[in-house]
Amino acid sequence: MACGLDPHHGFLHSSGRNKPALALDLAEEFRAAVADSVVIGAFNNGELQRHDFTSALGSTALRDKGRKALIAAYERRVAGTFHHPTFAYELTWRRAMEVQARLVLGVLDGSMPRYVGIRTRLTSDPSRRYLVAYDISDDRRRTRVSNCLQTYGDRVQYSVFVVDVRPARLVVCLRNSKVCFGYADSDRAGVAGDRGTAG
């Protein structure tokens, strides 16, 4: 609505039962990168556990603690940035949702020739995929590394991330956190990429 679109007039979803069809259409391209990533990450890193759910009368719901944890994980994710494949600049996932809605409006009013969805893993992108694992004793430094890596990828275990990032950016991230490949005996980061391993 903020972009001048009617959320009930969609292309893929029906607007029956007062569903916001267009909003659901736009949400599809963010499902894996944001929604699935948040939920899987929350389970993998222990933010969500079995006791955070309650079941009654055949249905299951989140308890308050679990709901707050999931919302916090979502907020962290949408605050992360990535390189927009169409406009070639860095933006947050939250901002990207508005940008994509404005692209739809552009196609409808004729100012844009076509709609291009968000694809973060193009073969022409110079970014590479890495598996990053770290063992850091200092809480502040560990938090800095975690926050940096969450910007570029997904947490798969408590101290393990899969990231899609340009090699230079990954090096800068780790160096700024002072844990680049063995900064101290107790503070190490291991990185496995598609062309080799460092650690």
Image (spheres, rainbow, N blue to C red):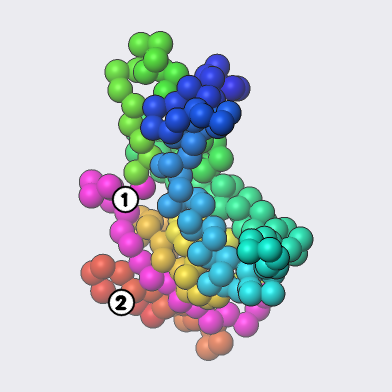
Over which residues does the magenta segment extend? 120-139
Which residue is pictured at 45% across the width and 44% down the height?
Answer: 30
Q: Classify 10 Å Cα crowding around label 1: few (below 14), some (14-19), many (20 and above).
A: some
Left or right: residue 121 compared with residue 174: left
- Ranked by sequence position, the earlier of labels 2 and 1 is 1
Could you say whether the residue bearing mark 1 is in a helix, strand or loop?
loop
User: Residue 129 location, x and y as percent?
Assistant: 33, 62
Does 28 sit above or below residue 53?
above
Image side of residue 152 versus residue 126, left or right: right
Q: Quadrant of residue 38?
A: bottom right
- Taking 150 as reference, is 142 left or right? right
Is residue 103 among what the camera can see? no
Q: Is residue 96 above or below residue 56?
A: above
Instruction: Name the residue that disc number 2 marks.
Output: 197
Residue 173: image tag: none
Query: Which residue is at a point 68% across and 63% down the rendered structure image?
Result: 57
Tell me which amino acid carries mark 1: Arg
Q: Nearer the viewer, residue 186 or 5?
A: 5
Q: Position of residue 88 (x, y in %)?
A: 37, 36
Residue ID for mark 1 = 121
Q: Residues within 10 Å of mark 2 (few under 14, many from 20)?
A: few
183 or 115, nearer to the observer: 115
Residue at (56, 31) in percent of width and height: 17
Q: Is residue 127 magenta?
A: yes
Foreground tag (2 vs 1): 1
The amino acid pointed to by label 2 is: Thr
Kind of element beneath mark 2: strand
Residue 83 visible, this orientation: yes
User: Residue 194: horizontal and vertical position, in percent?
Assistant: 26, 68
